Image (tube, rainbow, N blue to C red):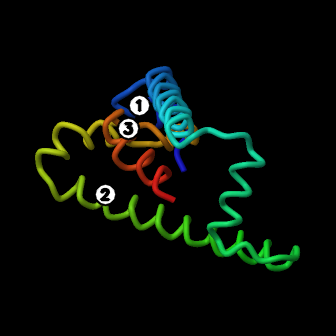
């Protein structure tokens, strides 16, 4: 753990730059999520739940429904984490992507808690947003 002074001294970007970058990233993700929802038919929540229920086998009972949701959630977590791991690893291995995109993320040497999403917007799209769009 670093003190606030060490963070400010080591980081190549200011705290306000990190906050702005994170807000841009979150805004882009919200816009893309809204667009995907609209393109997917954006029905009301009941219709979405009914469609998901039917696609998952449609069983009856609260236990079957809870079990199905747990399995879907666990599957989504595995897919997202796997995608993010391998994309992050690829960003380090590919010299072009590292130099032009991923190095942006490494300007934050001593991370702030709110800096978890501080990266280049294109990296955010490829790694974070795409991993959430799939599951």
> In terms of image quadrants, where is residue 34?
top right
Of callouts 1 and 3, the N-terminal one: 1
The mark found on residue 62 in the picture is none
Compare residues 71 and 53 and report the one nearer the observer: 53
Left/right of residue 124 with respect to residue 26 in the rendered view? left
Q: Residues within 10 Å of mark 1 (few under 14, many from 20)?
A: few
| Residue at mark 2 | 87
Q: Is residue 63 above or below residue 30?
A: below
**Mark with earlier residue (2, 3):** 2
Residue under the image location 44 percent in, 48 percent down: 128
Q: Secondary structure at mark 3?
A: loop
* Mark sitting on residue 9: 1
Residue 36, image x, y percentages: 50, 39
Q: Earlier in the sequence, mark 1 or mark 2?
A: 1
Residue behind mark 3: 119
In the displayed structure image, the side of residue 107 where residue 44 appears, left or right: right
Q: Are marks 1 and 3 in contact (CB under 8 Å)?
A: no
């Amino acid at each position: 753990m670093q003190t606030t002074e060490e963070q400010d001294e080591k980081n190549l970007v200011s705290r306000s730059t990190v906050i702005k970058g994170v807000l841009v990233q979150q805004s882009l993700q919200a816009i893309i999520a809204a667009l995907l929802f609209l393109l997917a038919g954006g029905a009301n929540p009941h219709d979405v739940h009914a469609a998901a229920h039917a696609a998952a086998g449609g069983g009856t009972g609260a236990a079957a429904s809870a079990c199905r949701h747990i399995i879907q959630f666990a599957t989504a977590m595995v897919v997202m984490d796997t995608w993010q791991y391998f994309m992050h690893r690829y960003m380090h291995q590919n010299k072009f992507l590292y130099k032009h995109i991923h190095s942006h993320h490494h300007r934050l040497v001593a991370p702030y808690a709110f800096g978890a999403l501080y990266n280049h917007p294109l990296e955010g799209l490829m790694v974070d947003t795409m991993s959430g769009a799939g599951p």
